[in-house]
Amino acid sequence: MEDIIQQLEEHIRSRYEIEADDEDFGTDVHLFDYGFIDSMGATALIAHIEQTYGIQVTNQDLMLYPMNTIQEIAHFISTKTGR
């Protein structure tokens, strides 16, 4: 799962222009509460997850799995892909 966490962190830092020295950003920070990603960004992130990992994120998934941090998202991806 570490490789998924690293890939997600790199993608999110790049896509949402988060500086490498941002002290608030980390793999366990709430991406939405801290303003790193907004609702439009969430839609783009879901599309990235679906394309990159070949999975579908359903409305039920969004209700069943917490996906607010990089670690939570990586856990979801790992569960769905069996990695």
Image (cartoon, rainbow, N blue to C red):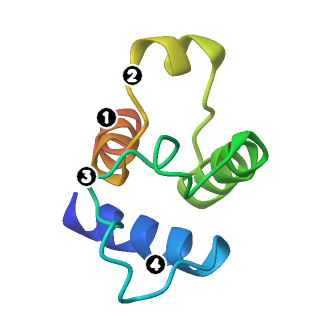
Q: Do the residues labelled 3 and 4 touch (CB within 8 Å)?
A: no
For the residues carrying marks 2 and 1, which lies nearer the camera in this image?
2
Q: Name the residue under label 2.
A: 65
Which of disc 1 and disc 2 is earlier in sequence?
2
Residue type of the residue flagged with mark 2: Tyr
Q: Mark 4 points at which residue?
A: 10
Looking at the image, which residue is at 32% across and 73% down? 6
Rendering coords of residue 13 (x, y %): 51, 76
Which is more N-terminal, label 4 or label 2?
4
Under tag 2, what secondary structure? loop
Question: Amino acid under label 3?
Answer: Asp
* Residue at far right of view: 40
**Residue position for label 3:** 28
Q: What residue type is labelled 4?
A: Glu
Q: Label 4 near label 1: C-beta < 8 Å? A: no
- Tag in front: 1 or 4: 4
